[in-house]
Image: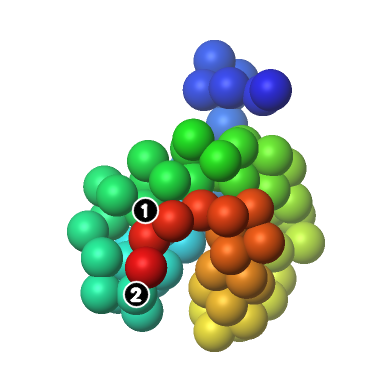
């Protein structure tokens, strides 16, 4: 598992925050809960950071819905 010890660029960190905040707004959940869920499911490091180069070129709606679908597929319980 990749972890927070890696050095991420400011753009990557800002993008991760953007993802977390927008998922939280759409799901009407606390951003801290979304962060914890993404971190615990490895989606934060294995998907959001790993796929930053491709993901950040997409629109907000696509990004948010894509991550939510992955959360559902991984069985992340937020609902």
Left or right of residue 50, residue 69 in this image:
left
Left or right of residue 41, residue 56 in this image:
right
Kindly identify the residue that appears in the image at 62 percent across and 70 percent down. Answer: 69
Disc 2 element: helix
In the rendering, at what x and y percent does residue 44 appear? 56, 43
In which quadrant will I find the N terminus? Answer: top right
**Front residue of 77 and 32:** 77
In the rendering, at what x and y percent does residue 20 appear? 40, 57
**Front residue of 52 and 40:** 40
Lower sequence index among marks 1 and 2: 2
Per the image, the residue denoted by label 2 is 27
Kindly identify the residue that appears in the image at 51 percent across and 53 percent down. Answer: 76
Crowd band around label 2 with a 10 angstrom C-alpha radius: few (<14), some (14–19), many (20+): some
Reply above or below: 45 against 72.
Answer: above
Tell which residue pokes out farthest to the top in this image.
5
**Front residue of 51 and 76:** 76
Q: Which mark is residue 44?
A: none
């Amino acid at each position: 598992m990749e972890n927070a010890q890696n050095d991420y660029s400011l753009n990557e960190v800002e993008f991760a925050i953007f993802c977390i905040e927008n998922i939280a707004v759409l799901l009407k959940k606390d951003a801290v809960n979304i962060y914890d869920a993404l971190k615990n499911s490895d989606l934060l490091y294995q998907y959001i950071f790993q796929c930053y180069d491709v993901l950040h070129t997409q629109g907000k709606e696509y990004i948010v819905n894509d991550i939510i679908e992955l959360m559902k597929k991984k069985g992340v319980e937020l609902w």
